[in-house]
Amino acid sequence: MHRRDFLAGALPGFGAYLAFRSEARAQGTSRAPRLKISAIKAARLRGINSKFVRVYTDQGLTGDGETLDTVGAQDIINNHLGPALVGRDPLDIEGIWFDLWSWKSPPGGIPPVFMRGMGGPYLAALSGIEMALWDLAGKAMGVPLYRLFGGRVRNKVAVYYHAGQPSEALKIVRSTGVKAIKTGIDNITQKDNPERGFDPGKSWNFTLTNRQIDDIASFVGSMREALGPELGLALECHTRYDTESAIQIAKAVERYRPMWFEEPVPSDNVEAMVAVRRSTRIPIAAGENIYTRYGFREYLEKQAVSIIQPDMAKCGGLWESRKIAAMAEVYHIPIAPHGVASTLGKVAYAHVCSTVPNFMILEWAHLYNEPLNRLMEPARQESGFVHVPDAPGIGIKLNDAAIRESLEPGYEFK
């Protein structure tokens, strides 16, 4: 093996550096021509939660990203954060993130993101821009994202799917080969059981009756029976319950050995999460509603959770999630990212997960993807794993024409 090849594989980022230098040589310069951001645009699609973000440069190279879950993020990108970054070097990703996040107000007098709140649409907008910048950086250097993040620990990442009923869970397992299923136990609704149920869409910090707890336990038992003893069964609560109800649910379903008990109580009450965790042997998971490394700090220091679940499209971005994972690794806590994005977003997450030693499993929320299938190429999946692409950047090509047909009025995507 040549020393050059050895270094490219052994040193984080060195392969990217070699690609960058080779491009510079091909153009007869000491360094590749400096790129400048010419525009950043976000597109909102009809009936789809995801918002695509595209970074444009003065040399025609573009990068694609995604943000979600927050109304208004696309307008923040188009009218505030995007215009403030015109003229910046898109490869200065850490500097751009810091300038938008910190007290350093970017050109144009736009207030920094943290002044708009530690979460919500401004941080989601920043996350989408950051993802697109990484995609662009990979394309500029001719390397996949995982190379920019230090290289892979694994070539493929384990994923899990969603199922609402035992029959559906069994069908998914047989057709995909996934080794784990997540189900929402807060879906025991009035429609299904009017005399005992509740409306999860209107419930928060909710106190359950004994009969409701029994119904949940019965449902979890039926899911476990369908899946068998070996497959993972994660229980989603969507922060619905008060502390005592969550503790009672955990006691009622503990015998079914769930893979985890997700967001049993509101995420803004760390002590309540600690109380639930101390009450049960079931691993407690949370993180989709926690933002940046600063938000995760208290959860990790207090050992409030067994598993963390950052959503990379709204918690601060891909590199921020890599930092969060490194913090969790110190506490021997695994990471199982929340993933209701499109294939573009989830494959970007997979790049990060492939570089993280303490990665556990990635959410692959297929139910959210149906309207998005024709908008981009699919990921390569096999036996419950997603293969991480070797193409430059994220490695997923968007169907621009199909996206343009799906745009809400007033948005463009070119």
Image: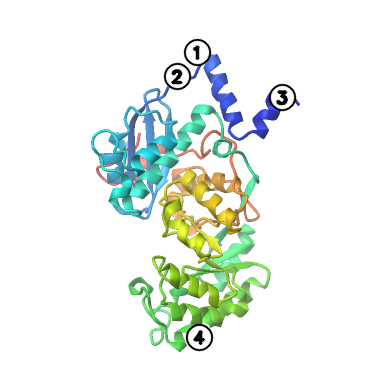
Percent position (x, y) of residue 373?
Answer: 47, 49
Q: Are marks 4 and 3 in contact (CB under 8 Å)?
A: no
Q: Quick one: label 4 or label 3, which is nearer the N terminus?
A: 3
Residue 33: mark in rendering: 2
From this view, report whether residue 372 is shown above or below residue 396. below
Q: CA distance from mark 2 to mark 3?
A: 27 Å
Q: Disc 1 marks which amino acid? A: Thr
Q: Quadrant of residue 198?
A: bottom left
Residue at image mark 1: 29
Q: Disc 4 marks which amino acid? A: Asp
Which image quadrant: the C terminus?
A: top left
Label 1 packing within 10 angstroms: few (<14), some (14-19), many (20+): few
Label 3 vs label 1, nearer the camera: 3
Residue at image mark 3: 3
Q: CA distance from mark 4 to mark 2?
A: 65 Å
Q: Are marks 1 and 2 in contact (CB under 8 Å)?
A: yes
Report the number of numbered marks. Answer: 4
Q: Quick one: label 2 or label 3, which is nearer the N terminus?
A: 3
Classify residue 223 as left or right of residue 272: right
Percent position (x, y) of residue 55?
Answer: 38, 34
Percent position (x, y) of residue 173?
Answer: 62, 63
> Farthest residue in the right direction?
1
Residue at image mark 4: 214
Could you tell me if residue 312 is visible in this image?
Answer: yes
